[in-house]
Image: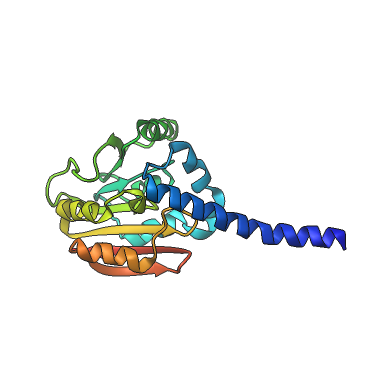
Amino acid sequence: MHVALIIFLAIIGIPISFIIYHTIVRIVRKIHPFPIPHFVTNLIDNPVRRKYWQKPDELADRMGVKPGDVVLEVGPGKGTYTMAVASRILPEGVVYAIDIQQPVLDRLEKRLEEEGVTNIIPKIDDAYKLSFEDESLDVIFAIACLPEIPKPINVLKEFKRILKPDGRISLCELFIDPDYPLRRTEKKWAKKAGLILKEEYGNWWAYQLNFGK
């Protein structure tokens, strides 16, 4: 009986602990916005997430990327999703992986060198004023990244500026992300930025939204 009680409390304690953690982090980041530290991506980008919740190949296929595309990813993290997209746009396509934290890009560059990937270009850039020409990109995507940027609507307007007329913007969110927005919230942001919803996948736990002009 004692063992059964301990097991029961452990099972109940895990979700309760997560809810408390999730709530505290959301409140802190709401009051004092700051970029997710690069080392935290090791926790967020884990094997369970990649196998069950946000499968890199599945997300990349839904984006509709094709050989020769010029792609932008905001917030590449460890580069798992970046590489899934990059493999689909060979031989001429390229992915620009941008972030505001150099340690994130340094780690990505090291991985690319080790794995011999040559069509991903890591670079520092400003999501509010991107260094790309108007209507120059085929696909733009962000995996659990857009909501951590303080003014997401402004960022989406910038995405629209640099997106080709037939291009696609893909936003993917996961509930365990401290900055997770409801699906309707992200749709509202996109609508205010002048974007049109094209496809949507997933559920409340993990979803993917594709937009166009």
Residue sticking out furthest to the front: 31
**Image quadrant containing the N terminus:** bottom right
Image quadrant assignment for residue 164: bottom left
Residue sticking out furthest to the right: 1
- Give the left or right position of residue 166, taking residue 207 as reference: left
* Above or below 104: residue 45: below
Q: Residue at x 20, y 61 (%)?
A: 193
Q: Residue at x 36, y 62 (%)?
A: 62
Residue 84, x across and y down, in percent:
40, 49
- From the viewer's side, name the closer residue of 132 and 35: 35
- Give the left or right position of residue 35, taking residue 135 as reference: right
* Above or below 205: residue 117: above
Image quadrant assignment for residue 13: bottom right
Q: Residue at x 68, y 62 (%)?
A: 12
Residue 57, x across and y down, in percent:
43, 55
Residue 109, x across and y down, in percent:
38, 32
- Give the left or right position of residue 14, taking residue 131 as reference: right
- From the viewer's side, name the closer residue of 116 and 55: 55
